[in-house]
Image (tube, helix red, strand yellow):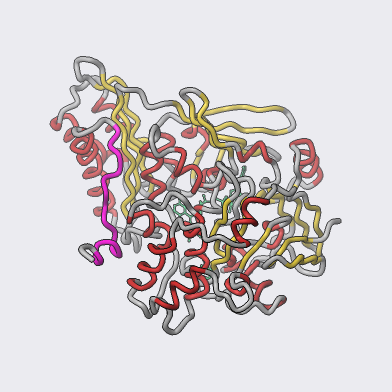
Amino acid sequence: MNALRFYVNDHLVEESAVSPTTTLLYYLREKLGLFATKEGCNEGDCGACTVAIVDAMAPGGPKFRAINSCLVLLPMVQGKRVYTAEGLATGDDLHEVQKRLAEGFGSQCGYCTPGVVMSMFEAAYREDLDEDWKLDDQMCGNLCRCTGYKPIYDATREVAGTRPEGRFRDVLEKAEASPMTLTYEHGAQRYFTPDSFEALWDVLEDHPTARLVSGGTDLSLEVSKQFKILPLLVSVEGLDALRRLAVDGDTLFIGATARLADVEDVTAERWQPIHRMLRFFGARQIKNRATIGGNLCTASPIGDMGPILVALGATAHLGSREGSRSMSVQDFLVGYRQTALQPSEILTHVTVPAIPATARCVAYKVSKRQELDISAVSAGLYVELDEANTVTLARLSFGGLSARPATRAAQAERALVGAQWTLESVERAAQSLKEDFNPISDHRGSSWYRSMVASNLLRGFFHETASGAVPALPYRPTATVNSFAGR
Ligand SMILES: Cc1cc2nc3c(=O)[nH]c(=O)nc-3n(C[C@H](O)[C@H](O)[C@H](O)COP(=O)(O)OP(=O)(O)OC[C@H]3O[C@@H](n4cnc5c(N)ncnc54)[C@H](O)[C@@H]3O)c2cc1C
Ligand code: FES
Ligand code: FES
């Protein structure tokens, strides 16, 4: 058995006497006495618990990542460097982000401040925060009850991308990937992080009831909100091959443990509909941990990546000791919280074909709030047209309308294929949608509302793609940016 080993504010921590499902937040506060990191919601929504880690394997080189410590189990930081608000100052000299926030009156009661500072800290070392909406995206996971956000926003804008000189730049420059390998046991609980496929298959063979875990943004809620004692977890984070994220010719390769924040970056140009969906997926801290594998394997009817991957005709690749097999993402998502995975089998990666010039494609997410909300309805909509403007292929995939994730609208598709791509045929298809779905009513929307939204999305698809086959996300002022326009 190994001990848990990681660094907090540059001090080595070695631990072998705590449960492996101890959250990083709990450990920082209750064991290390680092009380700056706060507990607000304990479910990834408020940002009070934000800390930064060094991600030495990030595409393009090592990066600081703001993450929600309430959703991170201690073994998930094995071998990593963690920084909290207490660790930023050097002696009496505050870090630049702390100075700017204090001088700009960005802290009042101070409850949110350490978390805000840590999201600003990530922003300070990012080099791509060149548009207002990106600043919003960076900070939308940090709630503040007091400031009205303007001072926080202004301070963030001042420090974003400045990469202040000093020891943190050195940390990034010297960062090296360290193995996460772990075999940990405490009481009746065990946690394994194998670093090779052979080791993974061995663990799964020896422990057929083990639960797999990747970024933990979904699974950790069972600990933080439901107080479950998970006896046996096997993490797939230690396998470098699963983190691969690359464009291979005309195919996008997304490893099962590729972070959604990185997927958002890589899809900005050629796979714009995926990029657009990720713009409205969770908050920065969530996307810094969440993975495509975790998103698909939860098979949630309101999971946001399913519909657009189904619409794009993506393929799921599965692996086990017996070998590998592939199927469409559509066939992978079998039913409510059910995938095609067999026991001891994992999702290894997803491949997405290029979007041909003859295609029209968009992704939509409709929720009560723009940022950090769960979809009432989501959609991935795709058609291919021939030279005569006839629809030759239609994949209309919806989330939130039925128990099965990313369900295709078979009747509506039938109404479109062979028809001209005109508003009249889209209108007929929108009517057919009523036969495809009988959505439930719940607190996110009534059955009537969901049906109406779905047919309007189809109409919107037609209108929006009139200006571009795969429209890029138009600049959409978000609440904060909007209210400060004309500063
Ligand atoms: C605050 C908050 C906001 C969120 N916002 C959104 C949102 O906007 N849209 C959305 O769709 N989701 C959202 N989620 C849900 C969640 O973040 C995503 O589903 C995420 O992609 C899960 O990835 P993960 O790596 O963290 O999964 P994990 O929690 O690690 O795993 C989830 C499940 O998948 C299984 N699993 C993981 N990887 C594999 C694999 N490679 N092979 C087999 N099984 C595997 C695990 O056993 C587990 O059952 C949100 C969650 C939170 C807490
Ligand atoms: S405590 Fe609210 S996001 Fe972690
Ligand atoms: S300063 Fe009080 S919650 Fe932000």
Residue 323 x/y as whole percent? 70, 27
Residue 5 x/y as whole percent? 77, 60
Residue 456 x/y as whole percent? 21, 44
Quadrant showing the N terminus: bottom right
User: Would residue 222 be found to the left or right of residue 188 on screen?
Assistant: left
**Residue at left 80%, top 65%?**
14
Quadrant showing the C terminus: bottom left
Find residue 241 and report its image quarter. top right
Residue 409 appears in view: no
Q: Main secondary structure of the magenta part?
A: loop
Furthest residue in direction front, as rendered: 165
User: Would residue 126 be found to the left or right of residue 203 on screen?
Assistant: left
Residue 483 appears in view: yes
User: Would residue 80 be found to the left or right of residue 245 on screen?
Assistant: right
374 or 287, which is in the foreground?
287
Residue 286 x/y as whole percent? 50, 57
**Residue at left 59%, top 70%?**
88
Furthest residue in direction left, as rendered: 424
**Residue at left 31%, top 27%?**
394
Q: Which residues are magenta?
A: 470-484
Q: Does 478 lie within the magenta span? A: yes
365 or 155, which is in the foreground?
155
Q: Does 63 lie within the magenta span? A: no
Find residue 392 and report its image quarter. top left
Q: Is residue 349 above or below residue 30?
A: above
